[in-house]
Amino acid sequence: MNKLSETFLWLLALAALTPGAHSAELLRTGDLVELNGRNATVRRLETLPYVESDYTKRFKFDAFENPKLKELRERHGLEAVIAPGKDEFERQVLLLDWTHRQFKKFGRPSTNCHGALGILGAIGEGHTFFCAHYAEVLVSAAASLGWVDRSLALRRHQGANKNGGSTEHSVTEMWSNQHRKWVMFDPTSNMTLETNGVPLNAWEIRQEWFYRGGTNLVFVIGKERRRYRKADLPIVLGKFANFGNLTVDPDEPDKYGFIGYIPNTDLMDAGYDYAKMFITKDALCDGTKWHVRTLPENPAADPYFPIGQSALNLEAKDGSLHVTLKTLTPNFARYELRIDRGGWNVTGEKFVWDVHPGRNRLEARTVNRFGVKGPVSTAEVDMKE
């Protein structure tokens, strides 16, 4: 079993312990039930769970009604920026690339400026910025398009062989409906990382680098998706006046020793909520002082709760199949339902599924107020003729 599967199973287990998440009567793949006097079998139930925890409750997401999001999206033509993408992930990578290319000078900030609109305006005035500002712009640009991107603060673990660059770094993690997971986006380096074609979150990058030698990591740069391996480092990203070359150094992933999750995306109004930040680390970090914050018990799963999901529960009751949907979707608009590969229709969070003899298929998804569609949940039930 791979690490992604382990994390998914852990999330299902956590959902099982979440108050109100489900009861013993809820159906699982393989269950046999009697419906309308006929025997039926749950052949497939594929859904991301609904998770409610201290970590989900910490987060504050930017609002659809925020006029600054509309201003950012329209002033900088962000819908046109992502339009060439063939799927959601390509469009998110195009936004990453756009963010990276907005910054003309890299180095110590030359003005005390915050918020994506202010930062982009100051770039036009010739000011210099560094990684935290790249992250700030990407988080708000993503929010303006209906995606959820969150800032991460990184810090090198103790004993790192520092070849260059800073001790700390800022990156982001964006929720991918396409990949059904959080994915690390580094706007300063215009980079994502993957293994076996699957983009990784920050904790997965950390584990691959420190505990598996990093040889399976693929460093993917820019909208061109140029791919590099550990042996190819350093990667020169560009030359900046009064700074020199901006590079992905051979020890770049050492910065993933500590990972701080900043739990708000309303950065144009509130700035970074460092007070509620929580941190993951392990014994590699012993002896190095950094911020003192809450440490998740399971760092591979606690910070990586699903969003945008339509958590689908089935229950046989009074000879009928009852469906309940639940979600953590910022700016939620509606659930949509598709039966037997027909058209998508709006549905409520609770309804009765009228199954028929033979194979029955139900699909559910969320749509947020920006029109972004969440991952599809699927159930298949076979009823005897």
Image (cartoon, rainbow, N blue to C red):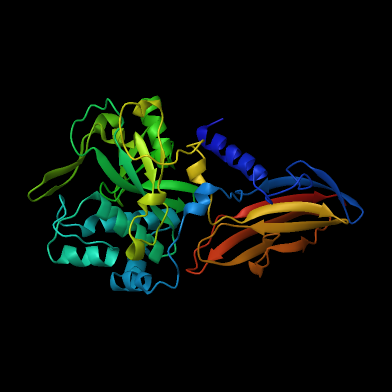
**Farthest residue, direction left:** 242
Q: Name the foreground residue: 276 vs 100.
A: 276
Q: Quadrant of residue 128?
A: bottom left
Image position of 236 with respect to 123: above or below: above
- Pinpoint residue 174: horizontal percent, then vertical percent: 41, 52
Is 383 left or right of 206, judged from the image as shown? right
Q: Looking at the image, which is closer to me, 17 or 122?
A: 17
46 to the left or right of 276: right
Q: Is 204 on the left-hand or right-hand side of 219?
A: right
Q: Residue at x 23, y 26 (%)?
A: 161
Against 381, residue 164 (above or below) is: above
**Residue at image location 56% in from the left, 34% down from the top:** 6
Residue at 29% across, 51% down: 187
Relative to 22, is 71 above or below? below
Q: Residue at point 21% right, 62% down?
A: 113
Measuring from the top left, give residue 109's x and y in whole percent: 16, 54
Residue 59 image position (x, y, % from top left): 47, 55
Q: Position of residue 268 (x, y in %)?
A: 33, 64
Q: Quadrant where the N terminus lies?
A: top right
Can residue 362 be seen here? yes
Compared across the picture, whether 233 is left or right of 377 comes to left
